[in-house]
Image (cartoon, rainbow, N blue to C red):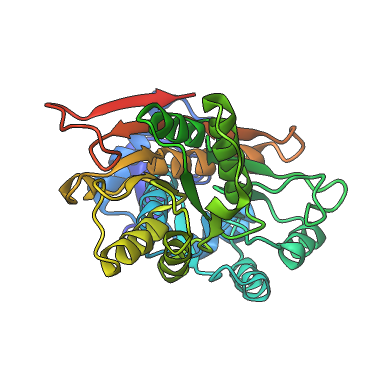
C-alpha cells in the first residue's frame, strides 16, 4: 500500500502539501492539488480515514435521520444527499426514526456517538427531545423537508441555530384545488398528512387558499387525516366517500396516501376520474403508468437532498453564520386523473 511520502515524491511536493490536499487544512493551488490527486490515483493511495479524523477532529461523515425510507419521495431525496456527500468526500450513516419522537432522539444520539460531523434530519411532528439533544450537544444540523418554527412550542431552544430546506407546499396545493374548481367541482376533499408536521399545515393552508380563490366555502367535513401513510389514507378516503354528500374531487397530500386513496376508491367499485377526480402532492416515477395517469405536484427531491448537504457543509465551515431556510419550487404535472382529456405531451409547470 502506498504511503503519503510516496505520493509526495511522485507529485514533487512536500508531505505537508499532500496533507493539506487530503484534509483541506490550507488552500492549495488548483494545479498543485490536481498533481497530488493524480499521484494518489497512479499509486493507488488510500487515505487513512481514522488518522485523518484524529488530525482534523472531523470524520468526514454525515448522519441522515429520515423516516419512511421506503417512501419514493424520501428515496429520491436520499439519493440527492448521498450524491452531494460523495461529491464533497463525505460518507453517510443512515437511520430511520419511524416518525416516533422517542425513537427519533435515540437514533440521532446513536449517529452522534458515531462522531458524525453533522446531521440532516427530517423531524417528527413533536421533536421536543430531538431539539433538546441537538441543542445540548451543539450538533450542526439541517432540517430536511419538515420545518421547525422557532416560535412553535416544539421549536428549538433559544440560541440554537439550524438551517432548513424544503419544497414549496402552500401555492402548489392551491394550484391543484383551483384546477379542480375550474373543472366544475364544488365539493373538493383533502386527505391531509400527519398532524403537527409543517408539510401538513402548509398543504392544508394551500387547500383553504384554493377554495377561497375559487369562491368555494370551506367545509371541515371534507378534510380528513391520512396520517401520511397508505392505510390511514384508505380509511380516511372511505370516510369521505361515506358522507351523505361525498366529494366529487380529491387532493391527496403525499404519494403514500395517494395509494391508500386509490385502494379505497377501488374497494367501492368506483373509478377515477369518472366517479372521483383526483390530484396528488408528490409525483411518482411510475405515475404516468397508472390508468388514469396521475395529475401531481412534483417535488425536487434530489435537489432538496443536495441542498441540505451544501447547507450543512457551509455550517461546518462557518459555525457562526446566520441560519438559512431554503425553499425550492415544485412543478405542476398535468395528466388525466383530474378529468382532463389526454394531452399529446405532459404539461409540467413550475410554481415558485
Where residue 333 sits, quadrant-wise, is top left
The foreground one among 62 and 89 is 62
Quadrant position of the N terminus in the picture = bottom left
Q: Nearer the viewer, residue 122 or 108?
A: 122
- Which residue is drawn at the image coordinates 38% and 31% (left, top)? 184
Q: Is residue 26 visible?
A: no
Which one is nearer the viewer's eye here, 18 or 313? 313
User: How far across and down, in percent of the image, does residue 49 sit?
Assistant: 48, 61
| Residue 287 picture location, percent across and down | 24, 48
**Residue projecting furthest to the front:** 244
How many marks the image carries: the answer is: 0
Q: Which residue is drawn at 78% across and 52% down?
A: 155
**Residue ranking furthest to the left:** 344
Asked if residue 303 shows in the view, the reply is yes
Residue 10 lies, in percent from the top left, at 31, 42
In the image, 209 versus 286, the foreground residue is 209
Residue 82 vs 242, above or below: the answer is above
198 displayed left or right of 227: right
Residue 327 location (% of width, % of height): 56, 33
Amino acid at each position: 500500500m502506498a504511503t503519503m511520502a510516496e505520493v509526495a515524491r511522485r507529485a514533487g511536493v512536500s508531505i505537508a502539501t499532500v496533507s493539506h490536499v487530503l484534509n483541506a487544512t490550507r488552500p492549495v493551488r488548483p494545479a498543485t492539488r490536481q498533481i497530488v490527486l493524480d499521484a494518489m490515483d497512479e499509486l493507488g493511495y488510500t487515505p487513512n480515514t481514522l488518522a485523518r479524523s484524529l488530525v482534523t477532529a472531523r470524520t468526514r461523515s454525515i448522519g441522515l435521520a429520515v423516516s419512511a425510507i421506503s417512501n419514493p419521495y424520501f428515496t429520491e431525496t436520499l439519493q440527492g444527499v448521498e450524491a452531494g456527500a460523495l461529491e464533497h468526500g463525505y460518507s453517510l450513516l443512515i437511520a430511520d426514526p419511524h416518525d416516533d419522537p422517542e425513537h427519533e432522539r435515540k437514533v440521532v444520539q446513536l449517529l452522534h456517538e458515531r462522531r458524525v460531523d453533522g446531521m440532516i434530519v427530517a423531524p417528527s411532528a413533536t421533536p421536543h427531545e430531538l431539539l433538546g439533544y441537538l441543542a445540548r450537544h451543539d450538533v450542526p444540523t439541517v432540517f430536511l423537508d419538515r420545518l421547525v418554527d422557532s416560535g412553535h412550542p416544539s421549536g428549538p431552544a433559544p440560541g440554537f441555530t439550524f438551517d432548513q430546506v424544503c419544497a414549496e407546499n402552500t401555492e402548489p396545493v392551491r394550484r391543484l384545488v383551483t384546477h379542480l374548481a375550474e373543472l366544475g367541482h364544488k365539493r373538493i376533499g383533502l386527505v391531509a398528512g400527519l398532524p403537527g408536521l409543517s408539510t401538513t399545515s402548509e398543504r392544508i393552508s394551500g387547500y383553504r387558499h384554493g377554495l377561497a380563490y375559487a369562491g368555494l366555502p370551506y367545509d371541515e367535513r371534507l378534510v380528513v387525516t391520512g396520517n401520511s401513510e397508505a392505510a390511514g389514507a384508505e380509511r380516511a378516503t372511505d370516510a369521505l366517500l361515506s358522507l351523505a354528500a361525498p366529494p366529487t374531487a380529491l387532493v391527496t397530500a403525499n404519494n403514500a396516501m395517494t395509494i391508500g386513496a386509490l385502494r379505497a376508491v377501488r374497494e367501492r367499485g368506483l373509478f377515477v376520474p369518472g366517479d372521483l377526480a383526483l390530484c396528488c402532492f408528490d409525483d411518482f416515477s411510475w405515475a404516468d403508468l397508472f390508468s388514469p395517469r396521475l395529475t401531481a405536484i412534483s417535488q425536487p427531491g434530489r435537489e432538496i437532498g443536495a441542498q441540505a448537504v451544501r447547507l450543512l457543509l457551509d455550517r461546518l465551515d462557518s459555525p457562526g453564520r446566520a441560519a438559512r431556510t431554503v425553499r425550492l419550487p415544485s412543478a405542476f404535472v398535468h395528466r388525466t386523473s383530474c378529468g382532463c382529456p389526454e394531452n399529446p405531451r405532459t404539461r409540467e409547470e413550475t410554481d415558485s
